Image: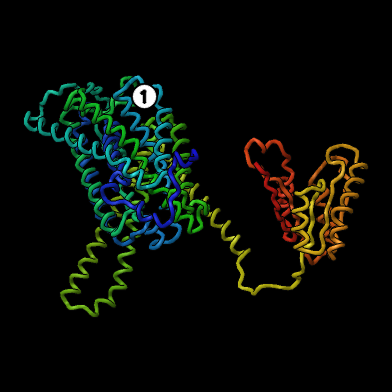
Amino acid sequence: MTVVRLILGRPLASHEQKQQRIGAAAGVPAMGLDALSSSAYGPEAALTILLPLGAAGLHYIGPITIAILALLVMLYFSYRQTIAAYPVNGGSYTVAKENLGVWPGLLAAAALMLDCVLNVAVGISAGVAALVSAVPALHSYMLPVCLGILALITLLNLRGTAEAGWAFVAPTYLFIASLMTVLGLGIFRALTSGGHSAPPVAPPPLPPAVEAAGGWLLLRSFASGCTAMTGVEAVSNGVSAFKEPTVRYAQRTLTIIVVVLAVLLGGIAYLSSAYHVGAMHQEQPGYQSVLSQLVAAVVGRGWFYYVAVGSTLAVLCLSANTSFVDFPRLCRLIAKDDFLPRPRAVVGRRLVFSVGILFLATAAGLLLVLFRGITDRLIPLFAVGAFLAFTLSQAGMVMHWRKEGRRGRGERKQMRPHEIARHIAQHQVRLWVNGIGAAATGGALAIIITAKFIKGAWITLLAIPALLTLFKLVHRHYGSIEAQVRTHEPLDLTHNDPPVVLLPIGRWDKVAGKALRFGMRLSPDVVAVHLSNLEGDAAGEETARMRREWAEDVEAPATAAGVPPPRLVFTQTPYRRFCEPLLKQIDRLKQQFPDRLIAVVVPELVERHWWQYPLHTRRPEQLRAALRRRGDSHVVIIDVPWYLED
């Protein structure tokens, strides 16, 4: 068993694709971890902005969360319609491209790609922050732990979507169960005690207020809290990962994700106010995440605390899996439209898009290194891409329903009056759902950009145009290739004489003999070129020996067989150069045979083992590289390998 097979598993055949598809049970951990885990850092990001208000800031987290939940409900109904209308991968990219145009679609794609990379970095860094809350001794090792978790998640996804989804089932549902238990118990105690329950472990005291509440501060808190919705679009981006019927399983998965997320966000906001739990700066010693403080305040620091915090750590880190499911599929759609390199569309050994997975892992790793794995530094970059994709998707769906309305006029002529009324009403409801969704997410996007611009959102606003430029350059390259190679002309058989064969030869042996026989089958005009003095020794004796061997072992058998004997040409190499004399000989043959191709037959020893590789010269590779650099359409290169025996 090879190392690759041991790590990644056996290669999967194309007909096993359906077995890799998932249902709602595996769909929640495979595509919902991004959204569910954001409940751990979304409310904390909002509370961090409210820190200057001191304890008074807790009075505002409730209204801010209600606004976020209202936006979440709009997104749910909007994306439920998107899944039904476009049951394919790509989500916002597909919807925007088909209804708003190619470049709005690419704008949505760039936003989604950036959001996926940031989700991986933020999820893992927030998970490690939860770990540091429970084990403060690891504070100095945050970045290495982040990179180690990233490597593990990458490996799991290279093994296949189904395996990754089922591997994350246990921690996902443990997280949901433990957090729901904490929220239920905490809310019960808060209600029965009249809002004055005594926590087993009191949270750290909030700092004194240093400023009064203002509209701008509350808008900034809302913008940071909106990071809790960044994974809602994930299901629509990867619908094809679900088994049949895909729409039903995708919508069911979306419903579970949104309901659980709404309960978590509402419960955390209520308990934060009831137990006086605020945010702390992640870089300060003794840092405790909001969830860590809440769990300790409700159940203490016993075994259940470590179960809850441990499952939070797992889910936050594994939330990157959502991006690993969506990002490669999105890249494949863009690559199939020739806006990304085509290798992104190639399916790997485990029926996943391995190139996209590795690219995502590399980009997220660089981001973690750049920001030292600190969540607070990454959060300002987050949510811009997600809400830009939300807005373009909803605007695209508005145009979709308008087109459907025009197409439906002909169908309504065959309907009864009450059926026409019901059809129009359904169409208007769908149109308004997506219209309100577009307006709401567009307004939220404006707030997020304004509130986060100085804090780092400007980096996102620069990265998106850079991606669009990349799309344009890649598309131009493929367009240039297509213009050069496309043809509708019949096969041209003029000047179709056999090529003139050129064979570089160092000495007469079995390797040269195999290449020479092949060349003589191609053409009666074969020119063998012997480069004398290539090793720096005297050329006279070497040339005489080669003439004698050629006459006895090549010319005599060829004459006896009645075929034209190959011609042997000697070329001196006083400076021991290999490629230049051969290129000059090719130029002389082109002048002698202007209407014929020159076929350069390159004999080459092929090593069986890695340790044999440095024992031989790399002259065949150097010759091929030199010929390709010339870009001569009248020269073809033919390899004739000689495989060494074990």
Residue 86 vertical position relative to residue 30 in the rendered view, above or below: below
Q: Secondary structure at mark 1?
A: loop
The image shows residue 97 at horizontal and vertical percentages of 41, 60
Residue furthest bottom as drawn: 414
Q: Is residue 548 left or right of residue 356?
A: right
For disc 1, the marked residue is 283
Residue drawn at x 78%, y 50% is: 512
Residue 137 vertical position relative to residue 8 in the rendered view, above or below: above
The image shows residue 71 at horizontal and vertical percentages of 25, 48
Q: Is residue 167 left or right of residue 549?
A: left
Residue drawn at x 42%, y 28% is: 143
**Residue 51 visible (yes or no):** no
The image shows residue 178 at horizontal and vertical percentages of 20, 34
Total labels drawn: 1
Residue density around tag 1, few if under 14, some if 14–19, many if 20 or more, within 10 Å = few
Q: Nearer the viewer, residue 529 or 394?
A: 529
Q: Is residue 593 left or right of residue 167?
A: right
Give the residue type at disc 1. Glu
Residue drawn at x 30%, y 25% is: 133
**Residue 380 visible (yes or no):** yes
